Amino acid sequence: MKKVISLLSISGTTVICESEVKGDSNVTKIAAEQTLRKQGLFLTWSKYDGTEWTKTVYTNSLAMSNTKTALSS
């Protein structure tokens, strides 16, 4: 891969997950998954409901952005 970037932006109770992948010219498929997790007691992590996103493209670049609103503080 030439470039992989993932960003997580938080504003109040809204989270935006953004990812960008750019592969070499011989890359023909990219699959990406974003999952938002929250820390619980004793350093355990659990997934927020409705915050698992996947995307597959049959090219050498992928961009995805997903938003979750009304999260607990």
Image: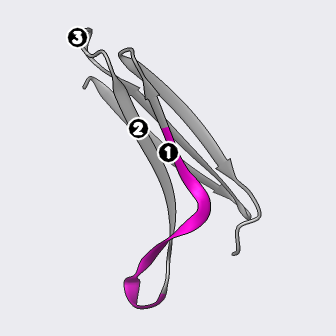
In the picture, measured across the screen, residue 22 lies left or right of residue 18, that is: left
Residue 27 is situated, as x and y percent measured from the top left of the image, at: 26, 16
Task: Specify the amino acid type for callout 2.
Answer: Ala
Residue lying farthest to the right in this orientation:
70
Q: Which mark is residue 32?
A: 2
Examine the structure image and report whether residue 44 is included in the region drawn in magenta. Answer: yes
Q: CA distance from mark 3 to mark 2?
A: 18 Å
> Residue 44 appears in which quarter of the rendering?
bottom left
Q: Is residue 1 left or right of residue 13?
A: left
Q: Residue at x 77, y 64 (%)?
A: 70
- In the rendered structure, are the residues bearing label 2 and label 1 in contact, judged by CB atoms less than 8 Å apart? no
* Disc nearest the viewer among 3 and 1: 3
Farthest bottom residue? Answer: 42
Where residue 23 sits in the image (x, y, percent)? 30, 20
Apparent side of residue 3 relative to residue 48 in the rendered image (left or right):
left
Task: Find disc 3 in the rendering and name its residue.
Answer: 26
Asked whether 72 or 33 is in front, the reply is 33
Residue at coordinates 49% horizontally, 83% vertically from top-left? Answer: 40
Number of numbered discs on residues? 3
| CA distance for labels 2 and 1 | 14 Å
Q: What residue is rendered at 38% in x and 14% in y?
A: 59
List x then y, in percent, for residue 25.
26, 9
Q: Closer to the observer: label 2 or label 1? A: 2
